[in-house]
Image: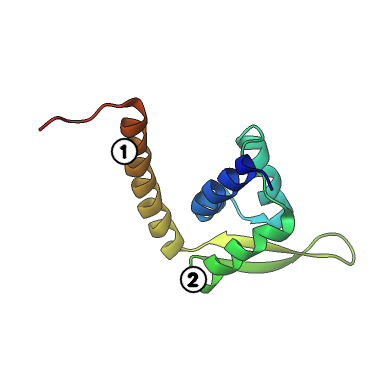
């Protein structure tokens, strides 16, 4: 695995729960749909293998931030849709605020703008 892949994986791991919660704040989605929306909305910058998507989904279910619901999809198929719960909305707000603060701090460091006290 290349250094670039390592960097991308570490950054994704740190933001994946927040991105999933954001998508689910707009509508209930199933796994493949979440995977495709992440790629489409990020213009290909955020991609995840479908199998790798389920670990963060299961963590969010375990923390009671999202719930799953099985719905018919055609004659013999069932799809598992994920739904954002109230606790998940509150957690998304906290994550978003922390992410914004961290991103601003990182930007300040990378641009070299330090407050000289």
**Viewer-nearest residue: 49 or 19:** 49
Q: Position of residue 33 (x, y in %)?
A: 71, 50
**Label 2 CA crowd tier, 10 Å (few <14, some 14–19, many 20+):** some
Depicted 20 relative to depicted 72: above or below: above
Depicted 51 relative to depicted 36: above or below: below
Q: CB atoms at circles 2 and 1 under 8 Å apart?
A: no
Residue labelled with disc 2: 64
Q: Position of residue 99 (x, y in %)?
A: 39, 46
Question: What separation in Å lies between label 2 and label 1 (alpha carbons)?
Answer: 30 Å
**Viewer-nearest residue: 70 or 21:** 21
Label 1 element class = helix
Residue at the extreme right of the image, as rendered: 75
Q: Position of residue 20 (x, y in %)?
A: 56, 52
Q: Earlier in the sequence, mark 2 or mark 1?
A: 2
User: Taking 113 as reference, is 70 left or right?
Assistant: right
Residue labelled with disc 1: 105
User: Residue at the location (68% across, 59% down)?
Assistant: 52
Res 71 quadrant in image: bottom right
Mark sitting on residue 34: none
User: Residue at the location (70% across, 57% down)?
Assistant: 31
User: Residue at the location (73% across, 60% down)?
Assistant: 51
**Label 1 CA crowd tier, 10 Å (few <14, some 14–19, many 20+):** some
User: Taking 49 as reference, is 16 left or right?
Assistant: left
Question: Of tags 2 and 1, which is closer to the observer?
Answer: 1
User: Taking 42 as reference, is 94 left or right?
Assistant: left
User: Taking 67 as reference, is 35 left or right?
Assistant: right
For the C terminus, the quadrant is top left
Judge whether residue 18 can be spotted in this image.
Answer: no
Res 58 quadrant in image: bottom right
Label 2 element class = loop
Depicted 23 relative to depicted 58: above or below: above
């Amino acid at each position: 695995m290349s250094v670039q892949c390592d960097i991308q994986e570490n950054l994704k791991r740190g933001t994946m729960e927040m991105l999933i919660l954001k998508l689910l704040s707009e509508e209930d989605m199933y796994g493949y749909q979440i995977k495709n929306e992440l790629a489409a909305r990020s213009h290909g910058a955020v991609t995840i293998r479908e199998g790798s998507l389920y670990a963060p989904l299961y963590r969010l279910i375990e923390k009671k931030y999202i719930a799953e619901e099985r719905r018919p999809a055609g004659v013999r198929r069932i799809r598992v849709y994920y739904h954002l719960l109230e606790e998940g909305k509150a957690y998304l707000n906290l994550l978003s605020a922390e992410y914004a603060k961290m991103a601003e701090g990182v930007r300040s460091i990378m641009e070299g703008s330090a407050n000289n006290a």
